């Protein structure tokens, strides 16, 4: 099915573009990114365009981007009151770089949102002034017994803290238990697959909780913990999860002060791991000492296909050894 991209800079333009769109077998991506809508503008979009149906085209919208709009809880509530009914096929909702705060997260996760008729699989909430309370609301939505549609959640640059991350990790453990108990592909499809916690004040306790969730069977495939100052202690927690051959296929630990000790622990954990394909460890103070541990593991044959060690103090000889070990067979 063809996807049409509609880029509008105002509510009026969005209405016009929707009205002019050919409705035959199309999926629509509607973007009002950086349109300076504010709460009043988003309310107008919801009530005058989406709710009115814009000649029936609103029902075709599968992707809605309202990032960078100064959107707060009032505008979010107005949007959520009409969104599920007006855009029943909506799969991706991008709300990053707004001012939702914990109240906005509560609304998104409540009866007007994820606990009601909103069935998005991808939700962007980066840079939204969320804290531990907001993380708790999201955790409650993820862990609800009837399942949650979310598979991709971006929480970058929100001060969730260890307390908030622990709540999210507990929700992931609940999802793992639900999937294990059901054995149903339908339940598996309602589990989170990608979680971005870049610069979210994760802390050692949060890292430990996430590792425990992964060991318990949480089917998370991509995890970003970049810029969280986890150090070698955080690396140890995650190495324990990797050693248990958890489901992760991509792990981003860029800029965490892991050092050579942390690199050694993570490298050792890859022995026997068949899932992890991408590992990002740039800007971690890793020298030849730490990099050589990866060279040994890669040369012995592990599943890793991409290793990022940018901004590391690695000699040319060790870099060449790593490149050779990572090269596909026959190259």
Image (cartoon, helix red, strand yellow):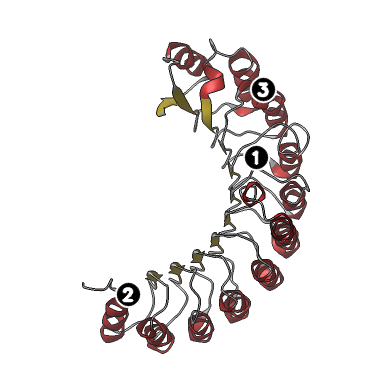
Residue underneath mark 3 = 85
Q: Position of residue 278 (x, y in %)?
A: 43, 66
Q: Position of residue 308 (x, y in %)?
A: 39, 70
SS for callout 2: helix
Q: What is the CA distance from the residue labelled 1 to the residue labelled 3?
A: 24 Å
Which of disc 3 and disc 2 is earlier in sequence? Answer: 3
Residue underneath mark 2 = 326
In the rendered view, would you say 296 is above or below 64? below
The quarter in which the C terminus is drawn is bottom left
**Residues at marks 2 and 1 touching, judged by CB atoms closer than 8 Å:** no
SS for callout 1: loop
In the rendered view, would you say 170 is above or below 88? below
Q: What is the CA distance from the residue labelled 2 to the residue labelled 1?
A: 43 Å
SS for callout 3: helix
Badge 2 local density, few (<14 within 10 Å), some, or many (20+)?
Answer: some
Q: Is residue 152 left or right of residue 331?
A: right
- For residue 99, the mark is 1
Residue at 73%, 63% in the rendered image: 166
Of 63 and 124, the residue lying toward us:
63
């Amino acid at each position: 099915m063809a996807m049409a991209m509609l880029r509008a800079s105002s509510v009026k333009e969005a209405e016009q573009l929707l009205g002019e769109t050919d409705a035959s077998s199309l999926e629509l991506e509607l973007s009002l990114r950086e349109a300076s809508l504010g709460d009043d503008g988003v309310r107008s979009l919801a009530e005058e365009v989406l709710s009115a149906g814009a000649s029936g085209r609103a029902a075709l919208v599968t992707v809605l981007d309202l990032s960078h709009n100064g959107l707060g809880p009032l505008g979010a509530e107005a949007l959520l009151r009409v969104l599920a009914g007006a855009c029943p096929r909506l799969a991706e909702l991008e709300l990053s770089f707004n001012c939702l705060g914990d109240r906005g997260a509560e609304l998104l996760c409540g009866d007007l949102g994820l606990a009601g008729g909103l069935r998005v699989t991808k939700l962007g909430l980066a840079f939204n002034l969320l804290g531990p309370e907001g993380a708790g609301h999201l955790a409650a939505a993820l862990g609800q017994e009837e399942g949650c549609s979310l598979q991709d959640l971006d929480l970058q640059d929100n001060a969730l803290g260890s307390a908030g991350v622990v709540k999210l990790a507990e929700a992931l453990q609940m999802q793992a238990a639900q999937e294990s108990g059901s054995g149903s592909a339908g339940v598996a499809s309602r589990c989170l697959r990608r979680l971005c916690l870049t610069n979210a004040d994760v802390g050692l306790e949060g890292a430990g909780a996430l590792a425990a969730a992964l060991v318990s069977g949480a089917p998370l495939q991509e995890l970003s913990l970049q810029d969280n100052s986890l150090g070698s202690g955080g690396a140890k927690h995650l190495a324990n999860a990797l050693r248990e051959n958890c489901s992760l296929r991509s792990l981003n630990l860029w800029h965490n002060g892991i050092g050579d000790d942390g690199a050694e622990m993570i490298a050792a954990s890859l022995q026997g791991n068949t899932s992890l394909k991408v590992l990002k460890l740039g800007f971690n103070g890793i020298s030849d000492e730490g990099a050589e541990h990866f060279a040994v593991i890669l040369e012995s044959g592990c599943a890793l296909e991409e290793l990022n060690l940018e901004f590391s103090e690695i000699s040319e000889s060790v870099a060449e050894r790593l490149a050779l070990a990572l090269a596909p067979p026959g190259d």
